[in-house]
Amino acid sequence: MSGADREAQFVPSKDSIFVPAGTVLFRQGDAGDCAYVVEEGRIAISLQDAAQSRRVAMRGRGEIFGEMAIVDGSTRSATATAIEDSRLLVVTADRLSHRLAAADPVLRMVVDVLSGRLRATMAQLARTERAAASDAPVPATGPEPGTGEHSAMADIRLEQDLVKGIARGELCLHFQPIVELAERRVLGFESLARWNHPERGLLPPADFIPRAETSGLITAITRWALPRALDDLLRLTEAASAAQVYVTVNVSVADLQDPDFPGFIASCLASRPDAEGRLKIEVTESLMLAQPDRVRDSLHRCREMGVDVAIDDFGTGYSSLGHLHRLPIGALKIDRNFIAAFDHGENGRKIVQTILRLAEDLVIPTIAEGVETEEQAALLAEMGCGQGQGYLFARPMPPEAAGRWLRDRSSGRRAVA
């Protein structure tokens, strides 16, 4: 077998391979099972048409090739041949597909469109050359739409609507109480964003906050929500004579990475002296791994202003235990899924007990989310959990309804939200 005809002999699952000059890594029309990054050497990319082969590109150190068949699930669009001894890093289909599946839908659409256009251009080039040889007319074709196009368009429309919604004042806050489990005393409220969409009605956070985070709009929402939460808190607690009740506001990693964010909080509190010591911020556990130094600095600056930090959905992230002792944590919020698991065996209880022991050792208060039954509340209190939040006490309410609920609790009547 000549060098030019040598076929690659390797296992695609390897992390890297060595191929001698003349090795054909794959041929046009083959099924694609991996892509490659050139560590050393050079790879020629050629188009095959009838009896001739034409080189159209060269890939050298640090460049990727063979990715198109993985991106769009089609066959190889060209032939790849090592023109000198080369060492290649192997990127398996599973690795690349996983990253593409986790990407933003708009980004996936862009990748699909670019891939489709490139394939269409290469096919059109081949047809043009064939037509030139036979004097036949060149048929015009276009790429097929990418599979993520509809999802991407929906995301783009949602993002555009959200920009308008923020400007038009369509967002509002609802408040869910946080209570002391032993005495059922109201300690605070979590503020939760809602969107009065002009066509879809009142939307919960899950329907628009993820898009706000990926688009960067989340910082604008936080800048709106934080002062609004303080204003709503002061109004609803003044009517109920509950001057010590606090409010929590969810913040994102983008907020904490903004060096001006602690200063923004300081200005909000300075203009509302009655809110001093009554603001807490909630951060999801997984954010602790996103630029931990910058996040930690921002949280410490907030804590210096008397703003406590609660770690939300604790137990569901990627184990930020190594960061706990370095963060100014004021509370751990136990994820609702662990509470719901109380009714389905011992595992949920064991996880909650482990979190409670950890919090006790670190002297950090705990808040159980998703408390829906008296049995869950009683068991949590018995296990040593100090605070709870959930439908057992009240659903999230508009500020006016939260104020009435608080007044009823203060007067000894049980309110129904």
Image (spheres, rainbow, N blue to C red):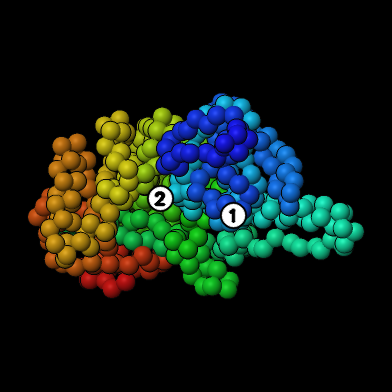
Between the residue at mark 2 and the residue at mark 1, the CA separation in whole angstroms equals 50 Å
Residue occupied by mark 2: 249
Q: Nearer the viewer, residue 209 or 234?
A: 209
Q: Amino acid at mark 1?
A: Thr
Of the residues tagged 2 and 1, which is closer to the observer? Answer: 1
Residue occupied by mark 1: 75
Q: Write the residue at 41% across / 58% down.
A: 192
Q: Is residue 142 above or below residue 24?
A: below
Q: Write the residue at 49% across / 70% down.
A: 202
Q: Nearer the viewer, residue 5 or 132?
A: 5
Q: Nearer the viewer, residue 257 or 87?
A: 87
Please tell me whether mark 1 sits on a helix, a strand or a loop.
loop
> Quadrant of the rendered structure where residue 2 is?
top right
61 relative position to 193: left or right: right
Residue, far front: 1
392 relative position to 270: left or right: left
Q: Amino acid at mark 2?
A: Val
